Image (cartoon, rainbow, N blue to C red):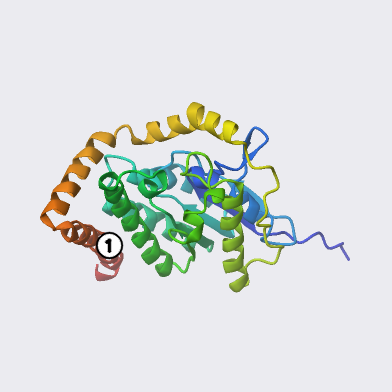
Amino acid sequence: MSPVGPSRGPRFVALGDSLSEGVGDPLGDGWRGWAALLADGLSDADVEFTNLAVSGAQTRDVLEKQLPVALALRPDVVSVVVGVNDTLRCTFDIHAVAARLDRVYAALSEQGALLLTACLPDPGTMLGLPGALARPLARRQRSVNTVVHALSERYGAVHLHAAEGEWTTERTMWSADRLHPGERGHRQLAARFHALLVERGRATGPAPSSEPEFPVPTRARSLWWLATAGTGWVVRRCTDLLPQLLALAADETRHRVRGTSARLDLRTAHAVSMALAALSVAEQRPEAA
C-alpha cells in the first residue's frame, strides 16, 4: 500500500490592478496585499497562490494578458478586482468594460473556478477632489460597480461590497495616496473575503488578522513616498483624462446651475442598462441561431 501524500490546498490566482498587486502594504522590496493575506486562510493545507495583478491594469489588460495565464494555471479560486483605472482614462466606455468583464468571468467560471469580485470606492471622493470634478468620476465608478454587481450574480461570484462604509473614511485604513489601502485596509479586505468564503464552505484556514504586523509608516515617510512615487502614480493614470475631466466638470456645473443634475445620473444609468442588455442579447444569439 503506497503512502498517502499531503493533501493539496486550493490553487488561488489573483487578477487585477494595483489593489490586488498589494500596493500600500509593503513587504521587503515589494508588496503583499489582501490577496496574499487571504491565501493563507483558504485552507489548512498549502495553498498555491499566484498573483498576476499589475499596477495600472485596466479591464483590457486583464482580458488580454492576465486571463490566458490564469486559465493555464487552472485555479480553484480566482479573484478579479479591476475597473478603477478604466474610470481614469479618457477612453472610458462602460459597454466595453462590461463586455470584457463578462468574457473574463465566463471563461474562468466555465473552467470551474470560484470567482471573487468586489465593488470599490470612487477615486474622486477618495482623493478629496472638488465636487464638480469628483461627481463625474463617481458616476463612472458607480457604473462599473453596477456592472460588477450584475455579472457577479450571473456567475455566482463571491462578491464583496467595499464601495461604501466606515472603512472608506477611516484614515488608518489608507495609505498616503488615499487611493490604496494601507496594511490595515488590506487586512480588512482579506478578512471580509475570508468571512464570505467561510459562509460558502470554501475557506477552512484561519481568518487573516485585522491587526497590522508592521508599524504604521511615519508621516514623514508617507509624505516622502507620496512626493516621489504616489503623485507620479496618480499623474500617469490621469494625464489623458484631465482635459476630458475639466469638460465633464464644466458640464456638471452647468447642470447644477440649471437644476438638471438628475439628467446626468439618468444618462449614466441608461448607459449601464444598455451595456448589460447587450450582454444578454449576445448570450442568446447562439441559441437563436
Q: Is residue 163 left or right of residue 22?
A: left
Q: Quadrant of the N terminus?
A: bottom right
Residue 282 percent coordinates (x, y)? 27, 62
> Circle 1 — which element?
helix
Residue 114 percent coordinates (x, y)? 54, 63
Residue located 60% across and 43% down the image: 25
Residue beneath label 1, please?
282
Q: Quadrant of the C terminus?
A: bottom left
- Residue 163, by quadrant, is bottom left
Q: Nearer the viewer, residue 16 or 172?
A: 172
Asked whether residue 9 appears in the rendered view, the answer is yes
Residue 60 percent coordinates (x, y)? 37, 44
Q: Nearer the viewer, residue 231 or 203?
A: 231
Residue 18 position (above or below residue 113): above
Asked whether residue 72 appears in the rendered view, the answer is no
Q: Is residue 270 left or right of residue 216?
A: left
Residue located 22% across and 59% down the image: 265
Q: Nearer the viewer, residue 52 or 251?
A: 251
Mark 1 residue type: Ala
Residue located 49% across and 60% down the image: 166
Residue 42 percent coordinates (x, y)? 66, 61
Residue at the far top in the pictured view: 228
Q: Is residue 276 left or right of residue 173?
A: left
